[in-house]
Amino acid sequence: MSFDHLFKFLVIGDSSVGKSCILLQFTNHRFQPIHDSTLGVEFGTRMIEISESRIKLQIWDTAGQETFKTITRSYYRGAVGCLLVYDITLRESFYHVQNWLQDVLEYSGPQTQIILVGNKTDLQGQRAVSTEEGKKFAEEHKINFIETSAKTANNIDEAFLEISNIIFNKIKNGEI
Ligand code: GDP
Ligand code: MG
């Protein structure tokens, strides 16, 4: 299928925060409880349309590599967008956001549009990171912020579309 733009997106973050489920929900509109947290899809694609331009999103998953700290530079290279995911029920995954951010800035470059994603909002009873904390971190680092549930699909499309729109406008304005 023809397209006007190809955007490479990354989904990064600690193991088990829901990266593969977010990708599956966005590309296949389904939730699959994946029991082995090291399993993952390699990448997914979805066509979107902004201002009559057809954009192909090519979204790369870490496919379990995050467990072994073997994510290569080629994984990051050329990414225009990045979802940096933590699990709102797992404080540790939020602490590690800082490290993931450093890596993506270093390897993908400062022009990459990053959105911080607090996933698993359907598990409100187990929440360990407040919305305000996530928002504050994002503001301090000048990145976008959203909370999602890959299980209910809440805000999944919005997370991808928000940064897609920003990237599209930057291209239109000749900024990238
Ligand atoms: P990854 O290691 O970051 O790719 O995480 P996965 O996508 O494999 O998900 C890890 C576990 O969290 C799986 O058991 C999923 O079913 C579960 N999970 C992922 N997203 C959500 C969510 O939004 N809500 C709930 N309740 N569970 C989720
Ligand atoms: Mg995975």
Image (cartoon, grey):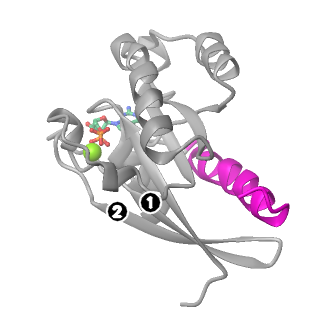
Place residue 150 in its image quadrant: top left
Is 173 one of the magenta-colored residues?
Answer: yes
Q: Position of residue 173 (x, y in %)?
A: 85, 61
Say if the magenta span includes residue 89: no
Camera-side residue: 126 or 38? 38
Q: Is residue 170 left or right of residue 41?
A: right
Which quarter of the picture shows residue 69? top left
Q: Nearer the viewer, residue 147 or 165?
A: 165
For mark 1, give the secondary structure: strand
Residue 61: tell me if it is visible. Answer: no
Q: Give coordinates of residue 119: x percent, y percent.
A: 47, 31
Would you identify the image quadrant in which residue 142 lies?
Answer: top right
Q: What kind of residue is marked 1?
A: Ile
- State whether residue 136 appears in this view: yes
Question: CB of mark 1 within 8 Å of CB of mark 2?
Answer: yes
Identify residue type, mark 2. Answer: Phe
Numbered mark located on residue 43 in the image: 2
Query: Which quadrant contains ligand 2?
Result: top left
- What is the magenta range? 154-176
